Amino acid sequence: MTNLLAASARKTAAVIAAAATIVAIGAVSSHTASAAAEGPAPLIHYSFDSAAGGTVGDLSGNGYDGVIKQSGASVAGGQLTLPGGARATAGYLEIPTAGLVGKQQLTVSTWLTGRSGPANTAAAFIGAPVASGASYSSAYWLLNPTNPSGYVKSVLTNTVSATAPWGTEVGAGSTNAATSGIKTPAGLSLYTTVIDGVAGTLTTYVNGTQISAVPIARNISSFGSNLVSYLGRSTYNDPGWAGDVDDFAVYATALSASDVTSLYTGQALDRAVAGVTVPGSATSSFTLPTSSSGVSVSWASDNAAIQVSGGTATVTRPSAGSADAVATLTATFTVGGATTTRTYSVTVPAELSDQAKADADLAAVSISGAGDVRTALSVATAGANGSSLSWSVVSGTAVASIEEGVKAGSATVAITRPAGADATVVLAVTATVGAATASKQITLTVKQAPTASAEKEAYVWAFFTGEGAGAERVSLAASKGNDALRWNTLNDGEPIFTSTQGTTGLRDPFIIRSHEGDKFYMLATDLKVAGLAGGFTTAQISGSRAIEVWESTDLVNWSAQRHVEVSSAYAGNTWAPEAYWDDEIGRYVVFWASNLYPTTDVASRTAVTYNRMIYVTTDDFVTFSEPQIWSDVKRGTGLGLIDSTVAEHDGTYYRFTKDEASMTIREEKSTDLLATISGTLPGTSGAADEWTLVQEKIATGLPNGEPGGTYSSGEGPSIFPSNPGDVNGFDWYLFIDQPNYHGGPNHYIPFGSTDITNGASWQPLGSILRENLPQNSDGGKPRHGTVIPVTRAEYQTVLEGFAPEIAVTEVAPITASTRAGTAPVLPKATLTTASGATSTVDVSWEGVDPADYAAAGTFTVRGIAQDASRMPVTATVTVTPGISLDLSTRCVAGKVVVAATVANAGSAAAHVTVSSAYGEKVVDLAGGKSTTVTFSTRAASVASGSVQASVDGATVATAAYGSRTC
């Protein structure tokens, strides 16, 4: 094995040298000569020292250069880094297979560090391609360092099965023996698989130690003459493997156990040393690794300032005023019969004096946003150097007070917003350590209280669109005016929020208006499922314990992202955070779903438990209390409760939650927001301050708006009140996300109700929303998110910020005129948007009371322009004097004649039609003129009657005459 070991040593030398420059001093002892033992040269060997144009050179001399495919894979620092992710895009290395065809004996040995977690994926693969018309390859060897059960998997398909080849796998961690072999070791490890078709065995080693040996009836030669081979993927439609490959070698022989041990020993020491770092300075105890790349590491210290026991380095700082201590830590690396040592210099700074501690802790105190305070805020009561921090209000006591904080180590600065003008508050903070103190003042500007809240006249929707590439970001949409079922796409269909922290994925955004009314907070789940090996299972076992937070005063300009850990170390996920203001405690309650585990060791978790609903409290969405269980009901294996959302009505809270047993939404009620449930779901009876059932399976079975479609199950319910004047006439809306895995169209399904207390009152509205959904440029439509009612001014700001082509900035004057007694004909509206475009649109005008145009004068009519923003408009109507009638009767030749005098009081000529029971006369009257027309009744006696005058078909005057006998 001289060739491979020599090449490996050349590669790691640079890494070791760089590490030594930073943290190590002293000489390196030699290790045993076993590393230089002669052995077979590799058939294929990649050390990943460099890559030219995406080609990784083969050091074996056989010309089997690998080629990097797709995106995200890179070679640097002697490693191939693979990104993982969706199969269609995730980078991988393609390995030539000409030298592999027909081989009965083969050994594959590779150093790997995985990041995919427990999942179905492949770090290395050799096998037949998927045949035309087939779904899977039935001939392969596959290496997955961490199968879904957390075990090393190295398997070969031992028989042919076109429909379920995974069922034919044999070897460590196979599908049918998922917990055979060993659990995945931490860190960089050497995975060696010997495929011996001559002896009929498949043997797997990890770090030179055998973990599995099984008989086989097939080998690489059984897989045919057309093979494919990869690092980072297989032929299955699984996500790509994420991790680092430090070295990869294939031998055209079956290495013996001693060969494998020697292979590992010769390479492990260098890698183990490279994998260890020690801080150059320490002020508190720290942990030292006791193994690295499978190599045991023992430690010794030459200074009492750092005492080592096992992997714990206990730090004792020299007393204040003393010189700093310098300890030399000696690490001894041992594997098999080989050892080497490294020394690391660690400085232990002397203790700060009490005054220095107080000064340092005081200097670290600041209040973000001190110039624009609108809500209560949390401040620290303990410093990093052990100071106690005490707070007081120097001036502005009518506006601010110091109260107990949301958790130990914090205090709350309670704020009462002043009326009429901003107020200045001066806070004093004193840091105290022993007898030493340090103080300073901080000035706050507390904004005046908002005036009476304007009526809500529109809606803003925050959402994500799914698991596709780029979909796990947050978009906003705006309603078409006061209509929760018709929407405008914003920002040209591009997401507005992209995470740069945590998993870099965003889901389930929730926007809450502050209790005071003039600030908004947005929360989101820190989760990126796209490309995550193991998908939602991995996300619940080893997912994020943080939420993402932004804040804004106008829904357009947002703060920097805050990545805040709110879950305990026992949680596996932190899903769908929402918040609600609790008047009783005077704080926000933030709640989400988490799987909880008995251990904080993520690597030991092999399966999901079940989701509980968890809550914390906060003043400012910066500092949060310790998490508490809110709802704890196991609903089946791996199933619980998720996605709670809350509304308050007449002093009672209504909670809508996804029950994972049925994947449907249940509605509960309580007068106490923080009441808990445990063990079993509540029924319909119980005290008012306990959660009781309103109805299970809300809206299940109703049409979902798709042709012939039904809402059967869903998630991510969003409950919100209808605005006054919403065109659809409901009091409440409940939007439920129905993804395709719940039989839906992969977007929200809306329901409306006039009675939130009645779980059977929800009416399906999906057919309307379906035709009026916002849609992103990639075709994505709203999934789990929030709809929030907004004022017209807030809505206008959002449109100007994200859709200037929709935001109306000018309405041309709208006028109309009519004669008294004639209903006006109201015109269209001409609008100009923030983008400069002008258009003329129809208007939905309010009804006009005939009394408004009964006499000359002016009046106004309000309407809603039928543009995309439903802009409110007003028309001014001028009523000009009208046509009048004056009637009389007389006798002519013994017959009654009706005489009608028609007068035009206006200035414009009028074409007047005068109608009676005895005929019709038409006259043209100039402005200010009058004329008389007569109607012969041809009767000696007539009953009372009336005459009408009309202009352009509209009756403008009516007069009556009495009965008459001649």
Image: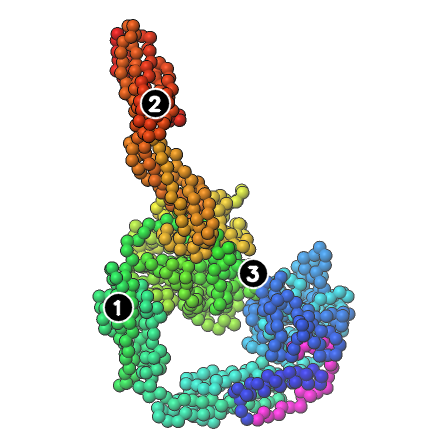
Q: Is residue 889 above or below residue 835?
A: above
- Residue visible at 29% across and 8% down? 892
- 60 sits to left or right of 150: right
> Which disc is residue 949 wearing?
2
Instruction: Tell me the residue at 71%/55% (across/down).
Output: 133
Residue numbers of the magenta segment: 27-48
Q: What residue is pinned by disc 3?
A: 469
The quarter of the image holding the C terminus is top left
> Which image quadrant: the N terminus?
bottom right
Label 2, residues with CA under 10 Å away: few <14, some 14-19, many ≥20: many
Q: Disc 3 residue type?
A: Ala
Secondary element type, mark 2: strand
Q: Give left or right: position of 735 versus 53.
A: left
Q: Which mark is residue 424?
A: 1
Q: Is residue 426 left or right of residue 539?
A: left
Say which residue appears at 50% left-offset and 71% top-offset.
602
Prevailing SS of the magenta stretch: loop
Q: Secondary structure at mark 1?
A: strand
**Mark 1: which amino acid?**
Thr
- Residue found at x 67% / y 57%: 135
Percent of width and height locating residue 734: 42, 49
Q: Are marks 2 and 3 in contact (CB under 8 Å)?
A: no
**Nearer the viewer's eye, disc 2 or disc 1?**
2
Residue 193 lies, in percent from the top left, at 67, 74
